[in-house]
Amino acid sequence: MKSNLSNASVKFIMSFGKMPLANKFLETNDFQSEKFYDMSVGFDEKLSLFQLIQSPDPEEMFDENYAFFSGTSKYMVSHFENFSDQIKERLKNISEKKKVIEIGCNDGIMLQNFSNKLEYDHLGIEPSKNVYAVAKEKNLNVINNFFTNELALNLTNYQKKTDVIYAANVICHIPDLNNLFNGIDELLNKKGVFIFEEPYLGDVIRLTSYDQIYDEHVYLFSLLSVDKISKLFDLEIIDAYPQITHGGSMRYVIGRKGEHIISDNFKKLLSKEFAQGLDKFDTYLRFKDNCESSKKRLIKMLNSFAEQNKKISGYAATSKSTTILNYCKIGKNLIKCIYDTTPIKINKFSPGMHIPIKHHQNFNITNSDISLLFGWNHKKEIFEKEKNYIKNGGIWISHISDLL
Ligand code: TYD
């Protein structure tokens, strides 16, 4: 267990109670040895940084059985193509071979867009062995390791020579930001940029989407926090792009201080954060109240359907669902099973509450009158796929009010 309370300015916001690892789907004989931690969040007032107060060791989460494959959503495949195109656009005026590094390249879904060896010198760094193996099979240049400053010091071919370092849904997983940013500094060339995107704190606060908080998300970033952290390393945000992925994300573009023009877009987005109060602790106390109300509302809604003898299931065994189920203490008595597409989750049980995971092809109106949409961020894709369910009178519900 690693404490993130390295800084005395972190103020406690709330606890979500005893939580298992969000992506550790279990067989029945794993139930006894399942590990839990206290999932509490705090706010670092100096850095305006929203964070877990303690989190399990990364080695426990990103192992050879990591259950998240980036390539499982069609929408995400095209999202990563667009992200790559934006990076390519940035690199288009560089005449020599461009050096590109992806931190946490997962199954290579995005890195494969830089596999043209005549144009790019690409490198992916991925700690989880199973997803790394998929990227390797695609003939991509990948290292099976965590990205650290120590690793960067060994990448002599890339030191102070890298044009772009990018990451998607990875940076908030890295507890030691000091070590991470030192590694970035080691690798970027003078005009090089570090681009990453993550679930966005502004959206979490706006929607009360507290399910974005789980072991892997050590931090929920904002422009305010990322800019303050970057400046500690003589870097700064030069541009930013809001994204709809993962229920609301932000893409940050960071360069060396004074080397780039800072976009008006970034300045506008930053002033929106001040207006939303993302720099103020009181905002997070209101968030706490909103989480508690959301929990009460969801439990009340499920109990009312159960009293009417409705069959209730969950849809998409996301990491986020682990937070909802364990925080609200929703078990098999209320939700019979969760339907999902990921082969290594099917026929296992959800972390903590041990709800069975079933193959998504078995999902239909006969076995589910009501479906709790845990993959709410994939609503469009899922509703398109499950048109018949809706036609046959199936009802979708969500812990986020006004989503459906
Ligand atoms: P995601 O929101 O990326 O999960 P997480 O909270 O872990 O970041 O959703 C991925 C999960 O959703 C994965 O378990 C597969 C499942 N899923 C479906 O079951 N059906 C679908 O149509 C989609 C898009 C995802």
Image: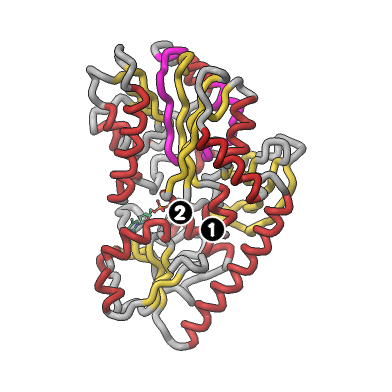
In this picture, residue 178 sits left or right of residue 111: right
Whether residue 181 is in magenta: the answer is yes
Number of the label disc, if any, that sits on residue 209: 1
Residue 34's disc number: none
Amino acid bearing label 1: Ser
Q: Is residue 145 above or below residue 306?
A: above
**CB of mark 2 near ligand 1 (< 8 Å):** yes
Magenta stretch holds residue 121:
no
Give the quarter of the image for residue 27.
bottom left
> What label sits on residue 247 in the rendered view?
2
Tell me which amino acid carries mark 2. Gly
266 up-or-down from 152: above or below: below
Quarter-of-image position of residue 139? top left
Where in the figure is residue 149, as x and y percent of width and height?
A: 53, 21
Which quarter of the image is occupied by the C terminus? Answer: bottom left
Figure quadrant of the N terminus: top right
Q: Residue at x 59, y 68 (%)?
A: 295
Q: Please tell me how many numbered marks the rendered image carries.
A: 2
Question: Which quadrant of the render holds ligand 1?
Answer: bottom left
As helix, strand or loop, the secondary structure at mark 1 comes to loop
User: Which range is magenta?
Assistant: 158-182
Tag 1: Cα neighbours inside 10 Å, few (<14), some, or many (≥20)? many
Which of disc 1 and disc 2 is earlier in sequence?
1
